Amino acid sequence: MRPFPHTFRTTSALHHPTPRPPHRPCGPPPAALLSPSPLHPSARRPSAPSPSPSTPPTEEPPLSRDPLTGDPLTGAPPASAPTAAIPGQTRAAARPADPLARFNTAPEAAAEAVLLACCGSRRWARRVAAHRPYPTIEALLAAADEAAYDMSGADLDEALGDETPPGLPPGTPSSAQTALRHAHDAYLARFGHAFVVCLDTDRPEEHLDRVLGGIRSRLDNEPEEERVASAEELRRVTRARLIHLVTEKGGLTGYSRPSVAV
């Protein structure tokens, strides 16, 4: 009888079973298992080249429509709409609000034009305009007075020839206007220029008596005496017009000489 064959295991196999592989949970492998071991340089993965500092990374343009349905995405800008550029911040040249500052910075021709509306002597206007800028109204008035005192005979004739006859406020009776017209015609025939008087310190209701009384009293003057009186009244009238010009009451645009020399 043949003996039944027996399979014998070695002692090492009995006491040292074959180890099982460790249990791995489902899901992505841990990062430690994916990273190459520093002990095996050959197992390292080649790293991607870093972008050049001078070349900025390219960004994908945002989607304007759903790739599946084709519907526009809410909040996404249209792909074809150009991005509106931010307008540059431009600041217009600041215009001085102070009338005196506007007068100081006005072009020379414009400054002379408004000065001629105050006094008809072109030499006087050029001289006053040439001394700009004036720090205060008082400085402007002082320069205007000095230029007026230095007027020549021709300058005074030019300025007086540019004056117009004094008018009266609206509503004045026609009889008063007729009396003023006759008195001024007599003055013009004697002295050859308009009657000039400054009324800046008189009330409107006093203008008629002031003008008529001034004409009648000065008709008796000699021509040279009247030139002196007219030059002084013209200087005062010019000051009043300048104050009107460079204060909030007036301005450099649309200034016109008042009908009554005030």
Image (cartoon, grey):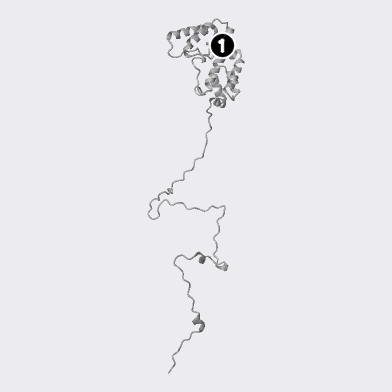
Q: Look at the picture and state if 83 lies above or below 10.
A: above
- The 10 Å Cα crowd at callout 1, few under 14, some 14 to 19, many 20 or more, is many
- The residue under label 1 is which amino acid type? Ser
**Residue at point 56% right, 11% down?**
230
The quarter holding residue 139 reads top right
Of residues 32 and 120, the one drawn nearer to the viewer in this rendering: 32
Pinpoint residue 1: horizontal percent, then vertical percent. Answer: 42, 95
Q: Look at the picture and state if 97 lies above or below 206.
A: below
Residue 106 visible? The answer is no
Pinpoint residue 245: horizontal percent, then vertical percent. Answer: 53, 21
Residue 206 visible? The answer is yes
Pinpoint residue 192: horizontal percent, then vertical percent. Answer: 54, 9
Q: Look at the picture and state if 45 lies above or below 129.
A: below
Please give the residue where the numbered disc 1 appears in the rendered image.
230
**Residue at point 46% right, 12% down?**
205
**Residue at point 59% right, 10% down?**
228
The quarter holding residue 113 reads top right
Of residues 169 and 189, the one drawn nearer to the viewer in this rendering: 169
Question: Which secondary structure, mark 1?
Answer: helix
